[in-house]
Image (spheres, helix red, strand yellow):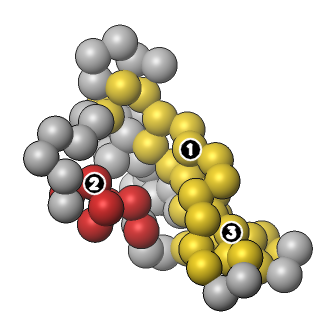
Amino acid sequence: MTALRMEVLIYEEERHSLGYDPLYSYLKSHKNPPEFTFIDTGCWRGYSGTWEIWESKLFLVELYGLDKDDND
């Protein structure tokens, strides 16, 4: 069994695993969101993100993924 790749949350300069995918809801709310292809069996969604909380707001600070059309 392959472990799932977790999102990363940085809070007060500490890194934590994030079991929720905040980008999913955002992408689903758009008519033509970018499409990703899976990275490996641990990341079927095709991307992984690093998030940080600043001033009580959640920011995406890094995104790694494979675009469905050109794979980078």
* Residue at x-position 19% and y-position 52%: 30
- Would you identify the image quadrant in which residue 38 lies? top left
- Quick one: which residue is furthest to the right in this view? 13
Question: Where residue 46 is drawn, which disc sits there?
Answer: none
* Residue at x-position 33% and y-position 45%: 44
Q: Residues within 10 Å of mark 3 (few under 14, many from 20)?
A: many
Q: In which quarter of the image is the N terminus?
A: bottom left
The tag earlier along the polypeptide, 3 or 2, is 2
Asked if 15 appears above or below 49 in the picture, the reply is below
* Residue at x-position 56% and y-position 44%: 63
Give how far across and how far down residue 48 sits, in percent. Answer: 51, 49
Give how far across and how far down residue 39 sits, in percent. Answer: 43, 34
- Would you identify the image quadrant in which residue 20 lies? bottom left
Taking the image as shown, residue 23 lies to the left or right of residue 34, namely: right
Amino acid type assigned to the residue bearing label 3 in the image: Glu
Question: Where residue 52 is drawn, which disc sits there?
Answer: 3
Q: Do the residues labelled 3 and 2 touch (CB within 8 Å)?
A: no
Amino acid type assigned to the residue bearing label 2 in the image: Leu
Asked if 37 appears above or below 43 in the picture, the reply is above
- Quick one: which residue is furthest to the front in this view? 55
Residue at the disc numbered 2: 27
Q: Can residue 41 be seen?
A: no
User: Which sits in the foreground, 52 or 43?
Assistant: 52
Residue at the disc numbered 1: 63
The local secondary structure at tag 3 comes to: strand
The CA span between labels 1 and 3 is 12 Å
Q: Residues within 10 Å of mark 2 (few under 14, many from 20)?
A: few
The CA span between labels 2 and 1 is 13 Å
The tag earlier along the polypeptide, 2 or 1, is 2
Taking the image as shown, residue 71 lies to the left or right of residue 25, namely: right
The tag earlier along the polypeptide, 1 or 3, is 3
